[in-house]
Image (tube, rainbow, N blue to C red):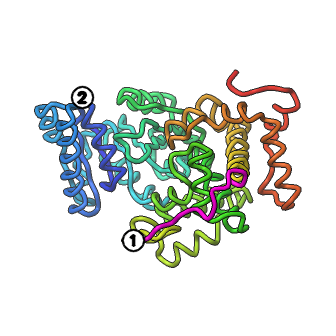
Amino acid sequence: MMTVGVVGAGAMGSGIAQVALRNGHPVILADVEKSAALKAKENIAGAFAREVEKGRLTSEAAADAQARLSVASLPLGLGDFAPCELVVEAIVEGLDAKQSLFQALEGVVSPESVLATNTSSLSVTSIASACENPSRVVGMHFFNPAPVMPLVEIIPGAQTSVAVLRAARGIADGWGKVTVLAADSPGFIVNRVARPYYGESLRILEEGVADAPTIDWALRELGGFRMGPFQLMDFIGNDVNYAVTESVWRATYFDARYKPSITQRRLVEAGWLGRKAGRGFYDYSDGATSRPATEDRALGQSIVSRVLAMLVNEAVDVVHWRIAAPADVDLAMTKGVNYPRGPLAWGNEIGLDNVLGEIERLRAETGEDRYRPSPLLRRMVREGRRFLE
């Protein structure tokens, strides 16, 4: 069984390590902070203990998995990765840091080893460019929590070899994950298609159409989403969510569709990062409550229609620009972020003509390029076609 290395012992890194251990691999987990790696080891042991309690794992299997985990601290422990045939990087979302790590790893592991980045928004091609052999670098984007969420986006950089791409996808498939193939484009599939869920909801808030609890209520109760956008931003962390939006916006040459929200930026500047800070769009102190200003279903349906039209339009554009196939788009959004329906299938259900009409209405009202219908959406409506049929 091949040895898997994971660099970065945060929630994502430790989750990926847990998945590899669960599938029988020896795993080396490292972090720049030895205490973080040791804490991750404790958390993984606790996760396996809970699986034993629930009858999903025998105590012997749990003990065996834990015995296959070793931890190291960087940079001194970098040499521990020498036997790894796959190393997954899950460190801070910074290009310089990732490039430096891959340069260092390349001098330690064998020439046949696969180097995978878990980046959520950076260019795989740029990360790989720091390596002498960039063909061995590939994107394997897991979703948090990695042991629970089934999706892995597989992203080849411009230099990634076909053999490395197949190997990465085969490994993830072998771990029981649902894999989709995405082009090396800003945000890949999920983080690109999902931007309007946050961005258009923030825009509705800033226009004074409804408050955050009302928008959340509408998208949960009428739209069928598991969490409203403001709840979700607070859960993810406003700093993290804002950073991804800004990254996609910059990487698309400041396309108005992805323009970040000043409202969210002010929360970040104030340190109101969401649940982890005790305050975000909502107050999480004891006794605090946040109820919708109204539960007017007509208003709620208008909110849902507006947000959903933007989501469908974005999904269509991902297909238009050949970032992903239609089936992979819908699979990614249902398996990666638990959308109640794939946005393309949802567009069929709503009527692509109705989606186009809503986007054109918003553009006529605002005059903004933000509300720009995808050329493919126009063509599909003109030709009377539907997706996934």
Q: Relative to residue 326, is residue 131 drawn left or right? A: left
Residue type for callout 1: Gly
Which quadrant holds residue 21? top left
Which image quadrant: the N terminus?
Answer: top left
Picture coordinates of residue 79, whole percent (x, y): 24, 50
Q: Relative to residue 130, is residue 258 drawn left or right? A: right
The residue sitting at the bottom extreme is 270
Gap between marks 2 and 1 measured at Cα: 52 Å
Q: Which mark is residue 1?
A: 2
Residue type for callout 2: Met
Magenta residues?
A: 287-300
Q: Relative to residue 64, is residue 379 drawn left or right? A: right
Q: Which of the two discs, 2 and 1, labels the residue nearer the N terminus? A: 2
Q: Which mark is residue 287?
A: 1
Say which residue appears at 72% left-offset and 47% top-offset.
Answer: 305
Q: Nearer the viewer, residue 361 or 189?
A: 361
Q: Main secondary structure of the magenta part?
A: loop
